[in-house]
Image (cartoon, rainbow, N blue to C red):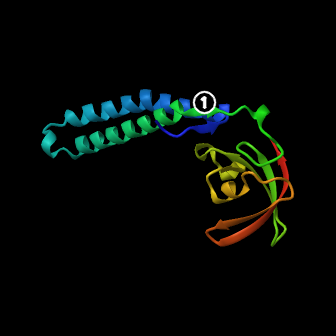
Amino acid sequence: MGKISYYTEEGLNRLKAELNDLKTKGRADIARQIAEARDKGDLSENAEYDAAKDAQGLLELKISKLEDIVANARILDESTIDASQVSVLSTVKIKNTKNGAEVTYTLVSEEEADLKTGKISVGSPIGKGLLGKKVGDKAEIKVPAGVMEFVVVDIGR
């Protein structure tokens, strides 16, 4: 039994599509590579065959992990999220107390995190440091560069 993870409906659908792609196209590609390598003769000294078999093992491992994630995934109902404090799927605006810079992040699961689109993982140092905070709360967050201090400016959905 894997750990339960929470996703947006869009994020879970993306995972399911990737899993389906790996099971269909991915497996077919690997089978073709193995067949081509097998056709080249002696398997005992066939590096292409060994590489294709290794790739097959890695593909099956990835499929297994994704199946576990999907089986233990739960969709978050955005309408039930408490906007009075930072939680998963909260969009939070924070202000750096040292330089006054404001930034807005949406807290999502690890697999959905994408800094370019402003989505950070609840498991990241900043994500963990913001969870449970309310507007006006200060968050001292230990990051690789040291300790940063933020003030929660706004929480939305």
- Is 38 in front, or is 150? 150
Establish if 48 lies above or below 80.
Answer: below
Horizontal side of residue 143 vs 41, given as left or right? right
* Amino acid on which disc 1 is placed: Asn
Q: Residue at x 82, y 69 (%)?
A: 97
Return the residue at label 1.
13
Q: Secondary structure at mark 1?
A: helix
Horizontal side of residue 9 vs 150, given as left or right? left
- Is 21 in front, or is 80? 80
Residue 13, position as x, y percentages in the image: 60, 30
Q: Residue at x 41, y 35 (%)?
A: 64
Residue 126, position as x, y percentages in the image: 68, 58
Residue 14, position as x, y percentages in the image: 59, 33
How many numbered marks does the figure carry? 1
Establish if 118 lies above or below 147.
Answer: above
Q: Residue at x 45, y 32 (%)?
A: 22
Horizontal side of residue 28 vs 114, given as left or right? left
Q: Residue at x 18, y 44 (%)?
A: 46
Residue 4 falls in which quadrant of the image?
A: top right
Category of crowding for the residue at label 1, using alpha-carbon neighbours closer than 10 angstroms: few (below 14), some (14–19), many (at least 20):
few
Residue 83, position as x, y percentages in the image: 82, 43
Quarter of the C terminus within the rendering: top right
